[in-house]
């Protein structure tokens, strides 16, 4: 007989001492099923010796669990009752800042030297009002590539494909006069 | 007061019982497929007579003038050219825009009907339209890439020869200069 069967047998004895009726019968049933499943008892012996529980007039309410637990009931949880909702972290999510507003580059001390990005690629920053100091941090990422060039004065350079501007005619008649006056050189 | 905008509302009047279509100037028009018109224009170009297309351009120019409350010569270029673009689109001749190359006025006509290989049909149409608008003899010479340079009637043959010899638009404009007042 296994340990488990021993435990069940002792439990069955306890229950039988308290309630000689239905519970004892059901516990015997459970014990019999365990034996059958483990091969200790021939199948012909698996039939319960007593009538099924439903046939027994039971003084126990039908709401009462009719199955005997296979193991002793665990102790009730001694943790305190939940008296507040779960609180999530109030820390804001960490967001990768855009390189163009990288604060580390501003706080870094001016370094010796050569600008890290394209010389004339950084447009003036109206929010700061001051040119950005180059960073000395070895892990600083390179500036993003900007498509607009900037003159030394800080003004963006616009590359125009238009022809040099001629005096703009004010009327359609002036425009016609100008274009119809064209002759071969 | 003319606000310079073209009103396309009610431009065409469809008379289904009479089987006619008229413009708001009471001119009768017909709907013609691009394929049919293309063959007609190609034949006209081979014969060297594009007068019908120039005449059609003059009619378009007349529609432009009817939408203006003052002579075109005293209106702003934007007002006149806006009407020209609108009328051109209403007749299904494509998207017309303008460019200034120095002193030259260049017309770009995108999505136009494909009529003939050298764009002479479209050139005749544009020449007739701007001649009507300006009340002068104007020629629009093809310069490739659906663009036409507007020049005086007298120099059109010379400019066309430059283009046929391989000159592109910048080269053509570079070979022209405004006539100095004497």
Image: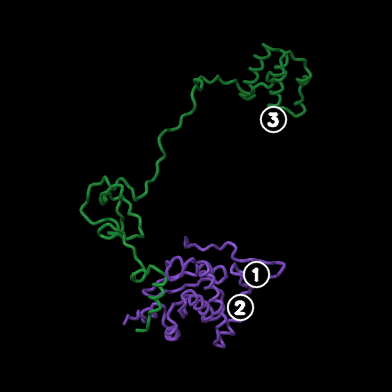
Chain colours: A green, B purple
Q: Are marks 3 and 2 in contact (CB under 8 Å)?
A: no
Of B46 and B85, the residue lying toward us: B85
The quarter of the picture where residue A172 lies is: bottom left
CB under 8 Å between discs 3 and 1: no
- In space, the residues marked 2 and 1 are separated at their CA atoms by 18 Å
Badge nearest the viewer, 2 or 1: 1
Compared with B169, A59 (above or below) is above
Mark 2, other Cα within 10 Å: few <14 / some 14–19 / many ≥20: some
| Viewer-nearest residue: B137 or A61 | B137
- In the picture, measured across the screen, residue A34 lies left or right of residue B146, that is right
Q: Chain of mark 3?
A: A
At x 69% / y 12%, what residue is drawn? Answer: A19
**Where does residue A164 sit, x and y in percent of width and height?**
33, 71
* Residue ID for mark 2: B37
Residue at image point 62% right, 77% down: B35
Question: Residue at 25% across / 59% down in the picture?
Answer: A152
Where residue B51 appears, x then y in whole percent?
55, 83
């Amino acid at each position: 007989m296994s340990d488990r069967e021993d435990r069940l047998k002792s439990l069955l004895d306890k229950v039988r001492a308290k309630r000689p009726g239905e519970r004892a019968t059901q516990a015997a049933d459970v014990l019999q099923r365990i034996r059958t499943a483990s091969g200790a008892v021939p199948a012909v012996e698996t039939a319960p010796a007593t009538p099924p529980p439903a046939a027994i007039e039971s003084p126990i309410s039908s709401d009462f669990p009719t199955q005997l637990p296979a193991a002793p009931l665990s102790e009730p949880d001694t943790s305190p009752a939940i008296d507040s909702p779960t609180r999530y972290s109030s820390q804001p999510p960490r967001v990768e800042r855009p390189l163009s507003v990288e604060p580390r580059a501003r706080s870094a001390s001016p370094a010796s030297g050569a600008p890290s990005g394209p010389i004339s690629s950084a447009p003036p920053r109206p929010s700061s009002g001051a040119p950005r100091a180059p960073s000395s941090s070895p892990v600083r990422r390179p500036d993003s590539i900007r498509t607009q060039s900037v003159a030394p004065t800080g003004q963006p350079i616009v590359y125009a494909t238009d022809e040099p501007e001629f005096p703009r005619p004010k009327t359609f008649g002036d425009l016609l006069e100008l274009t119809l006056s064209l002759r071969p050189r | 007061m003319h606000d310079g905008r073209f009103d396309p509302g009610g431009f065409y009047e469809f008379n289904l019982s009479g089987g006619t279509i008229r413009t708001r100037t009471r001119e009768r028009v017909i709907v013609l497929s691009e394929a049919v018109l293309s063959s007609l224009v190609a034949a006209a170009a081979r014969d060297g007579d594009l007068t019908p297309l120039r005449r059609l351009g003059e009619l378009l120019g007349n529609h432009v003038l009817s939408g203006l409350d003052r002579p075109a010569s005293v209106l702003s270029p934007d007002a006149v050219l806006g009407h020209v673009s609108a009328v051109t689109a209403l007749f299904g001749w494509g998207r017309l825009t303008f460019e200034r190359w120095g002193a030259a006025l260049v017309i770009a006509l995108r999505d136009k009907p494909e009529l003939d290989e050298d764009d002479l049909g479209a050139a005749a149409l544009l020449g007739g339209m701007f001649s009507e608008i300006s009340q002068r003899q104007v020629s629009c010479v093809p310069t490739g890439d659906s663009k036409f340079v507007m020049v005086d009637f007298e120099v059109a043959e010379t400019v066309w020869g430059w283009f046929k010899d391989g000159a592109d638009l910048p080269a053509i404009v570079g070979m022209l200069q405004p006539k100095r007042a004497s």
